[in-house]
Image: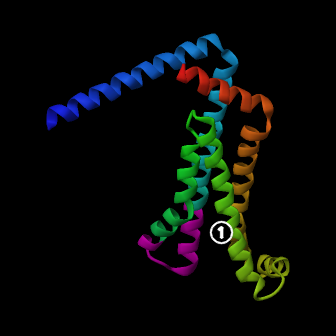
Amino acid sequence: MNEEKKQKHLEQMAQFKRQMERKTEIFAEYPEIRKFIQRKELYLRFLILFGAILYAFRGVMIRGITGGSVGSMIFGFLMGYGLYFIFLYACKSHQFKISALSGVLCICNFILNYTRGLQKIAAFGNPIEIYREALRVQPAVAILDLMPLLFFAFVCAFVFWMLLVPKNRKLAMQFEELLQA
């Protein structure tokens, strides 16, 4: 059994090495694809790190305000940011359709969650007036609730950059085709 696992692992490593060599060849032949992929990965690293910091800071602040346990803070972080992390990490895929679908799912998930929250707030009155009053009385709480909107804006900008800019879409599809060849 161990021999089979070792053999499978060696095959996977060889396949990974071949793929890396192929990527190096493509990047040497097509510098615009290399530049696009590097920029895409840089943006994704920023989004993943920024989202993690934002949600961790938010969890620490909420724990400080409510006096909750560390376990509940960690659970809240994982529930709040976990799915976004999965979608953003999936955007790193070199398959254009998977990458684009993951970005769109990230946006849809955020809209769904925030719409539910706004509906709950709307049960008590106009959400804009409620936030205005919350900013006046408890600015930290209102800012904590609005912080994910900044993250959402960055994710939307990235997904639109990837999908709606024809040059980027073309380069992503071209890179996928060259990797498969």
Q: Position of residue 99 (x, y in %)?
A: 61, 41
Q: Measured along the vertical axis of the image, is residue 19 above or below residue 47?
A: above
Q: Nearer the viewer, residue 12 or 157?
A: 12
Q: Is residue 108 left or right of 127 when viewed as pictured? A: left
Residue pointed to by mark 1: 113
Classified by dominant secondary structure, the portion drawn in magenta counts as: helix
Q: Is residue 145 magenta?
A: no
Q: Is residue 181 left or right of 143 when viewed as pictured? A: left
Look at 81% across and 79% down and name the residue there.
127
Q: Measured along the vertical axis of the image, is residue 26 above or below residue 96?
A: above
Q: Position of residue 41 (x, y in %)?
A: 60, 34
Q: Nearer the viewer, residue 110 or 128?
A: 110
Q: Quadrant of the C terminus?
A: top right
Q: Quadrant of residue 143?
A: bottom right
User: Residue furthest toward the top?
Assistant: 29
Tag count in the figure? 1
Q: Quadrant of residue 176?
A: top right
Q: Nearer the viewer, residue 52 or 92?
A: 92
Q: Nearer the viewer, residue 91 or 58?
A: 91
Look at 34% across and 29% down and name the residue there.
12
Look at 74% across and 79% down and name the residue there.
119
**Residue at disc 1, secondary structure:** helix
Render colour scheme: rainbow
Neighbourhood count class around disc 1 (C-alpha, 10 Å): few under 14, some 14–19, many 20 upward = few
Look at 55% across and 67% down and name the residue there.
59
Q: Measured along the vertical axis of the image, is residue 22 above or below residue 36?
A: above
Magenta residues? 56-72
Q: Is residue 65 magenta?
A: yes
Q: Position of residue 50 (x, y in %)?
A: 62, 50
Q: Position of residue 121 (x, y in %)?
A: 74, 82
| Residue type indicated by callout 1 | Asn
Q: Quadrant of residue 174?
A: top right
